[in-house]
Amino acid sequence: MAFNDNAPGAGLDEMVEAWLQAFEAAMAARDAAAVAALFQDDGIWRDLVALDWHVGTVLEAPAIGRALVRAAEATAPSGFHLAEDRTPPRRITRAGTETVEALFSFETLRGRGSGVLRLAPDAPATAKAWTLITTLDELKGFEEKSGDNRPSGENYSRSFGGGNWLDMREAVSAYRDREPTAIVVGGGQAGLAIAARLGQLDIDTLVIDRHERIGDNWRKRYHSLTLHNEVFANHLPYMDFPTTWPKYVPKDKIANWFESYADALELNFWTGTELVAGRWDEGAKRWTVTLRRRDGTERIMHPRHLIFATGANTRPFIPELPGLDDFAGEIRHSEGYVTGAAWKGKRALVLGTGNSGHDTAHDLYESGCDVSLIQRGSSGIISLESGQLLYALYTEGPAIEDCDLLAAAAPYPVLVKGFQLLTAEMRRRDARILEGLAARGFKFDFGHDDTGIQMKYFRRGGGYYIDVGCCDLIIDGKIPLLQWDGIERFVPEGALMHDGKIVPADLLVLATGYRGLSDLVAELLGADVAERIGPIWGFGEDGELRNMFRRTAQPGLWFTAGSLAMSRIYSKFLALQIKACEEGLIPLSRPEDSGTTSVAA
């Protein structure tokens, strides 16, 4: 959430160190009032499993003081100091607020952590915290097997007459004589990231995916797909994209990279495999799951952890549409759309005005198809260039590890204010596009609180379009726009309008989105489990994404999703929680009272 000025200032180190020392003293004394006095009245503390073993946010100084003292009694945090060899303290504006921003380190009884402190830029003696984030980096005694702690490889190096590395990898991945501790359902960026993190923590993990090849979740999407955000934020843990890669990465390049990544990180991955059923055994504290392979064979396994990494949305959603069964042409959901080459010289209707709808219509038009776009509800619209403002933090200069920490240091109220400012700036930049679309009758919105497309993604998983050219095709009348309320029903020839006119079509593409994760959980694990955990994705009352990246009310059930950046950032905290469960440091299920405060609408 970086927006402008990025300048160091004299005395910032001393200001931050003074605050950290006062904070540590107040925590050591278990003095909630003294802790609260170090925060602004409207201060915010966000913890990512460092002090509270939870992902949560606390608002306002008195509540923060009480929550931090409770956490300190269990974790005994100490050693707060400016982080060495990281971005130094600096004056900067975040979400429209001038602040002194500093990265710090600390440790607890069980682990080592990092944090971000944002101080009101007052005199050092009176500086108070606007926001504080504490994150867990590693568990003591269970450090990742990377860097100086990497394995020696001696158990397969120069093993003359014995198995080599490949033999061992094939045996390990086959699971002939053992079962995994964790099963990850879904092998996209979220599944790969959490599997890689767990592997470095010695958690035996199997990834399953229904596709034939690793990366097919990108490879099989429509032919022209390219990422809509620049490469700088889009990496997976431990293995960045090459610096030679283009700013906007094509889908097949990502797909191939996923295959290379799984091999390089030695991930156990079964393609052509689906989870078809699962149930929790409370007595044994493990799952019984049925996996079905491509050849129809089934395997029963008993993991202690089941991690859904299928994305925030899952199965295609096809709404009930009047006359849909009467349509004589081909009907296809956008999930199955690849290219418009076969529809040259024919006519098509695309229902839906999110990214998939616009991109499908655009591809059909460029393929020589006479295509119209049908809008059912309003959509958020930004240009590709304006969209890069959402990731400006990753072009500020700090290392990606620092950027990830800073990105996580934006609790819900800061996200809202920041995205409101960004959305206002994007509206200004995109005025020509918006005015042209309005003249064509296109309905657009900026979110119910003017927070724009990113909060739409967090709240509902879609409902927007990042323009890569389709808007001008609509503005110029090359792709006609129809409003759903002008359509009476579908008929064999196409869409019957209320005025009696028929818009003919040979193809109808339903870019109508996807069902939520709750439906998938109910289908595979039972309605009782889905009801027990409640909604998944979207912000809860605590200002965090519901049931994501943290323990749920169902023991042993976890969820991860999001962009490459989100998957990279939050996979670490999810993996550390699973490791803590395995080592008996925390229970499998989420405590009912996390100590967080309601912050989200």
Image: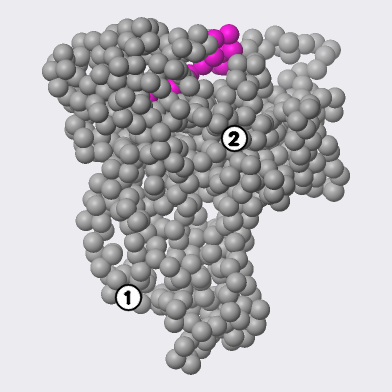
* Label pair 2/1, CB-CB below 8 angstroms: no
Q: Can you tell which quarter of the image residue 160 is in?
A: top right
Which residue occupies 34% across, 16% down?
Answer: 32
Q: Amino acid at mark 1?
A: Arg
Q: Secondary structure at mark 1?
A: loop
N-terminal label among 2 and 1? 1
Q: Confirm whether residue 506 shows in the render.
A: no
Identify the disc placed on residue 440: 1
Where 236 sits versus 167, above or below?
A: below
Percent position of residue 437, x then y:
31, 70
Determine which residue is flagged by label 2. Answer: 552
Res. 223 visible in picture: yes
* Nearest-to-viewer mark from 2 and 1: 2
The answer to whether residue 521 is left or right of residue 197 is right
Where does the image place residue 195, in percent across and percent down from the top left?
62, 30
Q: How many marks?
A: 2
The residue depicted at 28 percent of the width and 43 percent of the height is 417
For the magenta stretch, what is the residue range?
A: 132-146
In the picture, the quarter occupied by the N terminus is top left
